[in-house]
Amino acid sequence: MIYFGFFLLLCGLMQVMASYPIWWSLAVGHQYTSLGTQPILCGSIPGLVPKQLRFCRNYVEIMPSVAEGVKIGIQECQHQFRGRRWNCTTINDLAIFGPVLDKATRESSFVHAIASAGVAFAVTRSCAEGSATICGCDTRHKGPPGEGWKWGGCSEDAEFGSMVSREFADARENRPDARSAMNRHNNEAGRMSIIDHMHLKCKCHGLSGSCEVKTCWWSQPDFRVIGDYLKDKYDSSSEMVVEKHRESRGWVETLRPKFAFFKPPMERDLVYYESSPNFCEPNPETGSFGTRDRICNVTSHGIDGCDLLCCGRGHNTRTEKRKEKCHCIFHWCCYVSCQECVRVYDVHTCK
Ligand SMILES: *[C@@H]1O[C@H](CO)[C@@H](O)[C@H](O)[C@H]1NC(C)=O
Ligand SMILES: *[C@@H]1O[C@H](CO)[C@@H](O)[C@H](O)[C@H]1NC(C)=O
């Protein structure tokens, strides 16, 4: 009994101490795959604060999109970081990224921004697809039609998606400490990137695509555009320092740019205040897996190149045979036939 109590206490502590939202685990592993088929039991989602639990119960029909949003955020993170020492690996259902995100690093800033952008994006998309009753198309931002086109179709309501992301993703970021301030800032920067990239999408109607009538609507960009944009923000993210102020409600931490001679960060920039480990060697404390056995690019001088990725330890080379389609012939009409060839590749991995 005592042990069990201790275990519960430990779980409670883990939830309080982890600096990333544990409900992100909704997006990975078995919890996610069961979402589509079962009614969501809000009480069974780990790590929800009371405000999120209320939200989940009131708007349960959009919860699958919230989970989907975190999932596309994590997938995009893995794409953007695929050649880097830390490659956005998820480790298991509950710890998701492991201790890596406990520190207020640039990596944490990126993951928060892309996850909250993902939630805004997925909710907005599913509303436009008509999969929830409480939301739909945007009718407020139409304005007069343009030259040669008129409004039509369903404009995506990015403000609704952002509002859901703000309510849900920021619900636990209300502590007076520096980490909460950082997470709030980066979450908002992620959501803004979606609003900023809204664009008109148009479709031609008329006999055989003659474009006699053209209709347009507001659309979100591909999520890859958001990923590329936020990756640039990661590369230029601003280092901050923590300042303590005494206010009537007690001590409050805020962030101030570390270097006065750099341009201070704007709303759209990512901020962090702790330096990253170098991720070269495995270290369970920092959550680094090290880069041993990682595939590196022998011709690149960038971070994915063997020198930098392998941290100067050198690399091994092996050859790998891969079957590929080749000598393809187009037959009139219409199919293509190919032969199968074996090609030999050099594969370089870090020592
Ligand atoms: C990411 O890093 C992990 C740990 O080093 C490795 O096991 C995995 O294969 C890497 N993924 C990619 C896509 O390189
Ligand atoms: C390796 O790096 C070179 C130079 O940056 C690049 O052109 C090439 O596409 C890279 N190869 C792979 C497999 O990523």
Image (spheres, rainbow, N blue to C red):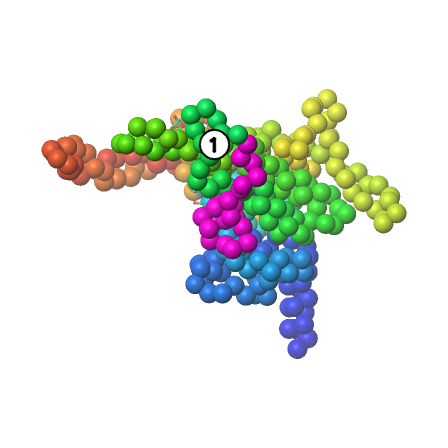
From this view, report whether residue 40 is shown above or below residue 301: below
Instruction: Say how many tags the image has.
Output: 1
Q: Nearer the viewer, residue 124 or 24?
A: 124
Residue 283 visible in image: no
Q: Which residue is mark 1?
A: 200
Q: Nearer the viewer, residue 216 or 248?
A: 216
Q: Position of residue 119 (x, y in %)?
A: 54, 47
Q: In this picture, which residue range is highlighted in magenta? A: 120-143
> Seen in the image, is 334 located left or right of residue 147?
left
Check mark 1 vs ligand 2: CB closer than 8 Å? yes or no: no
> Seen in the image, is 233 located left or right of residue 259?
left
- Report the residue at 65% width, 53% height from top: 18
Q: Nearer the viewer, residue 150 or 273?
A: 150
Q: Position of residue 62 (x, y in %)?
A: 53, 55
- Report the residue at 84% width, 41% height from top: 245
Residue 23 visible in image: yes
- Report the residue at 47% width, 32% height from top: 200
Q: Residue furthest left?
A: 332
Q: Position of residue 48 (x, y in %)?
A: 63, 59
- Occupied quadrant, residue 294: top left
Quadrant for the C terminus in the image: top left
Quadrant for the N terminus in the image: bottom right
